[in-house]
Image (tube, coloured by chain):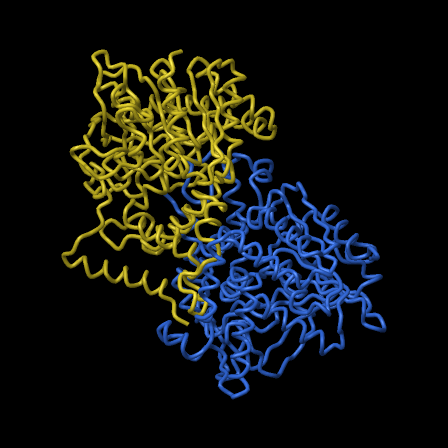
Chain colours: A yellow, B blue
Amino acid sequence: MAFPCVDQLEQRTQKFLQSFDGGPEPSYSNPVSGYSLYQHNEPFLLDHGGILPKFEIAYESWGELNADKSNVILLHTGLSASSHAKSHAANTAPGWWEKFIGPGLAIDTNRFHVICTNVIGGCYGSTGPSSIDPKDNKPYATRFPIITIFDMVRAQFDMLSSMGIHKLHASVGASMGGMQSLAAALLFKERVGKVISISAAARSHPYSIALRFTQRQVLMADPNWNKGFYYDKVPPHGGMKLAREIATISYRSGPEWEQRFGRKRAQPTTTPSLCADFLIETYLDHQGERFCLQYDPNSLLYVSKAMDMFDLSASTSAETAIRRARNTLRLQEGKGSSAPENAATPPEEQAAACVTGTPAAELKAKEEIQDDPKAQLNDLKQGLSTIKDIPTLVLGIQSDILFPVWQQKEVADCLRETGNKSVTYYELDSMYGHDAFLLEIVNVGSAVKGHLELKE
Amino acid sequence: MAFPCVDQLEQRTQKFLQSFDGGPEPSYSNPVSGYSLYQHNEPFLLDHGGILPKFEIAYESWGELNADKSNVILLHTGLSASSHAKSHAANTAPGWWEKFIGPGLAIDTNRFHVICTNVIGGCYGSTGPSSIDPKDNKPYATRFPIITIFDMVRAQFDMLSSMGIHKLHASVGASMGGMQSLAAALLFKERVGKVISISAAARSHPYSIALRFTQRQVLMADPNWNKGFYYDKVPPHGGMKLAREIATISYRSGPEWEQRFGRKRAQPTTTPSLCADFLIETYLDHQGERFCLQYDPNSLLYVSKAMDMFDLSASTSAETAIRRARNTLRLQEGKGSSAPENAATPPEEQAAACVTGTPAAELKAKEEIQDDPKAQLNDLKQGLSTIKDIPTLVLGIQSDILFPVWQQKEVADCLRETGNKSVTYYELDSMYGHDAFLLEIVNVGSAVKGHLELKE
């Protein structure tokens, strides 16, 4: 039996090995160009105790900034997207929300100044694991510290401050971007006018964590991953391809594939094979191929982990606040480093030396909440009460498996119960699953436009 | 940062390498003992043109066979199960349907003689890829021919014939077993009294194919898989572990994990890590660990592929019938081999030389059906009309992601529309997803008992 899918991986590895004699290496910021850079040259404390000595954020913008800088929309991206949401003179390639941004469109560039950033931890121009650690001029790799969704947002708001933008008209995002848009309102409630959170959640649930866990596991099992130190070697292209195939299953829906592929085979006259055979399989294979050298594997690990840890519950915010307060003290005392100093030491010593996990004192209370679904929901409501005065649009897709619609309903219900009088909640019956936010231009677009432009 | 999950895989590989100096190798039939063997010593033609020169089936049985051999229930297994459905004197370990089989239980051993087999292609005693090819006394590995669900059933019925059992009281199964139970009725309608099909489908749909495809891909990407030839080497334990982790996501449900794990971390006081960290992750890790040396990786490939190809539509049955007729002729002419002779030749030559895929003449008609959902459904109804006189219980679980409940509804609706007057259809609201058939002893058990014992 022939196994072209296995041969293909081996051939690509060989090609890489040959190319090191002078050929090109994958450069993860290649797909993106024409972005601007915000430079932050002060140490930046992260939620879990890591410190970036400095960082950069890649961003792009569309539409005119008005005189009092009050017409800004901060657009947050999903896991693997760049700041290139829309084509412009410096990069004419279509962006990931090309048809949602423009004159008269969902985000109307005649009215608004739209800014989109590549998140920290990413690889499209912003500081992430593939960036150079100033300490030794080598890529951070897995020496990069653990980051959270809040860290990403805090970095974005440092950038906004440097631009003299005090208050956003709106914080907008889908998927991980929908987590960020909520997080922004929680962190900076005075600086966010409206919130749009599409196909996201107020806390990551175990099924979504499981889906991302398997992606990380297949990537890390690729021998080329080499514990993250592959930047001058063969990248873990096989593991990345597999991770993307798994991800793709969670991005679309059964009903769509039923219509699009059904049980059709790619080459019906041939013997069934163990490599890609049905059309659905060649589709997954193609998605994996397209992605495997485009995005930095370590960025996938860090950013997907940040999604897993996302939780807007009050108890989690309190934990983080305590950790940050203690670590701020450490930072002021000059003890900071890019990663917790003792990452390789046993957990008990680690916990004693620096504050990284849940402080022991808070642990018991946390466990009691975690054992009681009602207490959990109250905890979440309390966390969300910070944004009870911010008009919020929550939108979900009924066929979404990764962020099932009950998770958006949870956000909307909690917000309403905190007394938020301006919560709009829509469910779409699109068959495009989680990816609907990229494809449902009219249905998603109208909701976005209405929320952004309605006078309240 | 430490990566214990990566180190663990490497340590197991090293342990295997050391053990080859005289230590034990994994033996995939180890977990099972005390089964009987049916020996079939004639060449056995498979649906896709392969021929097994001979085969064995491992089986176990419970309850007394009555005088006229009319009280037999053939119990079909899911993908990775053995014939050990229930403990007995020769193997006292609990079986996979331990609490469903016994005096007074769902399958009442005071009334029925239950036979359960390990499928061909499997590794628990029946002939599969890890079996010895008599041609060269080496394991078949991926020289094993492609098999179908119908091939498995045909082999089972050869065994029944050898036992003098002409007609089953019932053909019963869940998951892949529920495919087999329907296939048995289609192939041998005179020999099947009743059918029970739980959490299965009449044809595999693209979403389920996608889920199995990614499992096969991660397994085949493990360098230790070695295109299937690992039997005297390090087995692809890492790939198997990953495949099982992905499978586990499709076997359970979000709501169950919400209750069981929520957002609890395994060691809350430690820094978040990229290996297993949340409880849900340690659960998946554990499931992978438990399975990775228990089941033959090549069996997983062949048996899961058989599930993908499953389709009871009339056009598919017609295709198979044509292929079988032509290949029977070849077999009689003595041209048969265990694998299509020309598996490595280009597809066009392959199609010309032996009949393995869809015959070109039938291809156009097939394509027209595949482009029209109504025609597809009619095709399926026509295929299922063979069993219009057999009382059938179809049962589905509302939280099942792998075989969503609409697929069981499809079976029941089609059967009813063919004129079958005795179709019972139940939906369970269990939160256990696809695995509910193993766990819902009362809800699933009562339905099974009622259907088996009701006089019609």
Res. A212 visible in picture: no
Of the 4 image quadrants, the one containing the C terminus of chain B is: bottom right
Residue at left offset 40%, top offset 24%:
A196
Between B177 and B81, the one nearer to me in the picture: B177
Between residue A129 and residue A387, name the one nearer to us.
A387
| Image label count | 0
Is residue A374 visible to us here?
yes
Which residue is depicted at the point 28% across and 43% down? A141
Q: Residue furthest left?
A: A22
Q: Is residue A377 above or below residue B32?
A: above
Residue A84 rendering spot, x and y as whole percentages: 25, 35
- Residue A89 locus on image (x, y percent): 16, 33
Q: Position of residue B400 (x, y in %)?
A: 59, 46
Q: Is residue B155 above or below residue A265?
A: below
Q: Report whether B356 appears left or right of A334.
A: right
Location of the N terminus of chain B by quadrant is top left
Quick check: A264 above or below A422?
A: below
Q: Residue at x 37, y 73 (%)?
A: B348
Q: Is residue A41 left or right of residue B69?
A: left
Task: Choose top left, top right, bottom left or bottom right for residue A250.
Answer: top left
Measuring from the top left, give residue B356's x and y in whole percent.
47, 73
Please give the name of the residue rendered at 71% of the width and 59% of the height, measured from the top-left corner.
B195
Task: Tell whether A182 sits left or right of A335.
Answer: right
Q: Quadrant of residue A438?
A: top left
Q: Is residue A19 shown left or right of residue B438? A: left
